[in-house]
Image (cartoon, coloured by chain):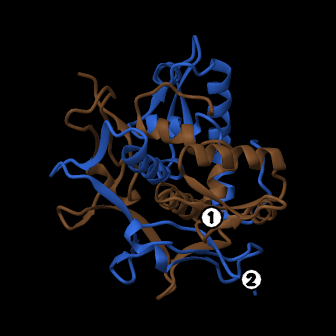
Chain colours: A blue, B brown
C-alpha cells in the first residue's frame, strides 16, 4: 500500500491508489487493450522489473487491473484494465490535454473526425449540458460518513474546469 | 527536478511536473485562492516543512505558482496558482470524480445548481459538442518535433472518456 495522506478527500484517496510513479503511465498503456508484462516493460524504458511487478500487484489488489495467464510453463500473464481502471482514462486524458498545452507542445489532443483540439469539461446529465467549473461542488452524500465538504470552483470561467476548492468553514 | 520518464508523451511530461507526492494536493488547495505557507501546511497534515518548501520551489520554477511576500520581517510569502497551474484544476477534478465514484463514496462531485453528479467529458469546439473518448487522438502538431503518435481511444463508450491509447505501429 502506498503512503496514505490521511485526508477525507476523494482527490487524496485517488492519489493513494494511482499517485505512485509509473502507475498512471501503466493505465495509459493499458487503455489500448490488454498488455503482457514484457509489453509494459518495453513501453516504459527505465522501469525496473521489480517495480513494474509491484505496481501491477497493487493495481490488481485495488481492482484496477485483472491478470490472466496465457502460458503456464513458463508462467506468463497479461493485464487488462477493469472498468474501475478504465475510468481513470479521463485522468490520463486531462494530463494529456494539459501537457500538450504546456509541457509537450509537439502534440495535441484532437477530435479525430475534424482534427481540432478537444477540451475537457464538466457535464451535468440532469441539466443536459456543459457546466462551468465555477458551479461544481464536492458534497457529502446523504448518509455518507465523515469527509469535510470541499468546493470545486473555478477561479476563472475562461479556464474551463479547475476544481476541488476547500469550502469555507462553518 | 523530479525524476524524468524520458518519454515523448504529454502524460509523462506532465507527471514529471506534478506527479510528486503532495503536488496535486497543493494545486487542489490553491484552487480556492492564494495560500500562505502555514495555510498549506495546515491543510496537509503530515507534510514535513522542508518537503512543502521544496514542492513550492519546484512549482514556482515550473511557473505553476507565483510567490508574493506579504511580510518582510519576518519574511512570509503567499502562493497563488498561475494560469498554467490553475488549468490543472481539471486533473484534480477528474481525480475527484473518479475518487468519489470508487474510493471515497462519502462525497460526490455535483452541479451546485441542481445537486446532481457531474461527469467529465471531451468537447470539440469546432464540432460544438461532446465527443466520445473513442474519437480522441493524440497527434503530433504540424512542425512539432519528435513524439510518437499515441491514440486516445475509449475502450467502451459507456465509460465516458478514457484516453491516450498507444497508436498501432507503422
Q: Which residue matches tag 2?
A: A169
Q: Chain of mark 2?
A: A
Which is nearer the eye, A139 or A115?
A115
Specify the quadrant that holds the N terminus of chain A: top right
Q: Is residue A145 left or right of residue A46?
A: right
Query: Which residue is farthest left?
Result: A114
Specify the quadrant that holds the C terminus of chain A: bottom right
- Point out residue A21 in the picture as x, y percentages from the top left corner: 62, 35
- Point out residue A155 in the picture as x, y percentages from the top left corner: 50, 72
- Point out residue B106 in the picture as x, y percentages from the top left corner: 68, 72
Which is nearer the eye, B151 or B60?
B60
Q: CA distance from mark 1 to mark 2?
A: 16 Å
Identify whether A136 is placed above or below A49. below
> Do the CB atoms of the residues marked 1 and 2 lie less than 8 Å apart?
no
- Point out residue B40 in the picture as x, y percentages from the top left corner: 74, 61
User: Which residue occupies 41% across, 34% down?
Assistant: B9
Which is nearer the eye, A99 or B60?
B60
Q: Is residue B99 left or right of residue B85?
A: right
The disc at residue B30 is: 1
Amino acid at each position: 500500500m502506498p503512503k496514505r495522506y490521511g485526508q477525507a478527500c476523494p482527490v487524496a484517496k485517488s492519489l493513494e491508489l494511482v499517485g505512485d510513479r509509473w502507475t498512471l503511465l501503466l493505465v495509459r498503456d493499458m487503455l489500448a487493450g490488454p498488455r503482457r508484462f514484457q509489453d509494459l516493460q518495453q513501453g516504459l524504458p527505465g522501469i525496473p522489473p521489480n517495480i513494474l511487478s509491484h505496481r501491477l500487484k497493487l493495481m490488481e489488489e485495488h481492482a484496477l487491473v485483472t491478470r490472466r495467464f496465457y502460458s503456464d510453463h513458463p508462467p506468463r500473464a497479461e493485464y487488462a484494465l477493469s472498468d474501475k481502471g478504465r475510468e481513470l482514462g479521463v485522468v490520463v486524458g486531462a494530463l494529456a490535454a494539459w501537457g500538450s498545452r504546456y509541457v509537450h507542445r509537439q502534440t495535441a489532443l484532437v477530435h479525430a473526425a475534424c482534427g481540432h483540439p478537444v477540451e475537457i469539461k464538466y457535464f451535468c446529465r440532469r441539466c443536459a449540458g456543459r457546466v462551468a467549473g465555477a458551479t461544481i461542488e464536492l458534497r457529502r452524500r446523504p448518509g455518507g460518513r465523515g469527509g469535510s465538504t470541499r468546493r470545486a470552483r473555478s477561479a476563472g470561467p475562461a479556464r474551463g474546469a479547475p476544481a476541488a476548492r476547500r469550502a469555507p468553514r462553518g
